[in-house]
Image: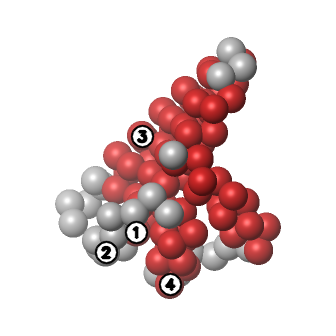
Amino acid sequence: MKSDEYKLWFDKSDENIKWATDNFQESNHELVCFLSQQAVELVLKGYIYSKDVIFPKTHNLSRLLEICKSLGLKTDKHLEKEIDGLSEFYF
């Protein structure tokens, strides 16, 4: 892996959060949900990438989180439950 490429995934996630915040103020709730899902997906994939692991082709946040946990990411049950619910907003 090129040393800091994973940071691009985090930067893109930050952009999605900004867009979600802007759209929330405009009451575009469906788009906010989608952008939020995308932001979390990008962070999880960035974390996986930072560990020199190729992530699977998936948008399932729970699956990505399990991979992250196997690579050392510490989480709690509340986060896992929230991520389960957020995955559905990819569609």
Q: Nearer the viewer, residue 69 or 5?
A: 69
Q: State the separation of the CA atoms marked 2 and 1.
A: 6 Å
Sooner in the amino-acid sequence: mark 2 or mark 1: 1
**Image quadrant of residue 74?**
bottom right
The answer to whether residue 16 is above or below residue 58 is above
Residue under numbered circle 3: 12
**Image quadrant of residue 6?**
bottom left
Identify the disc placed on residue 53: 2
Q: Nearer the viewer, residue 70 or 88?
A: 88
Q: Residues within 10 Å of mark 2 (few under 14, many from 20)?
A: some
Sooner in the amino-acid sequence: mark 4 or mark 2: 2
Residue drawn at x 43%, y 41% is: 11
Q: State the separation of the CA atoms marked 2 and 3.
A: 19 Å
Identify the disc placed on residue 70: 4
**Image quadrant of residue 82?**
bottom right
Look at label 4 and name its amino acid: Ser
Look at label 2 and name its amino acid: Val
Q: State the separation of the CA atoms marked 3 and 4.
A: 24 Å
**Quadrant, the N terminus:** bottom left
Determine whether, in the image, residue 28 is placed left or right of residue 72.
right
Residue under numbered circle 1: 48
Which residue reaches farthest left? 2
Residue 68: image location, x then y, percent? 50, 74
Q: Residue 13: in sight, yes or no?
A: yes
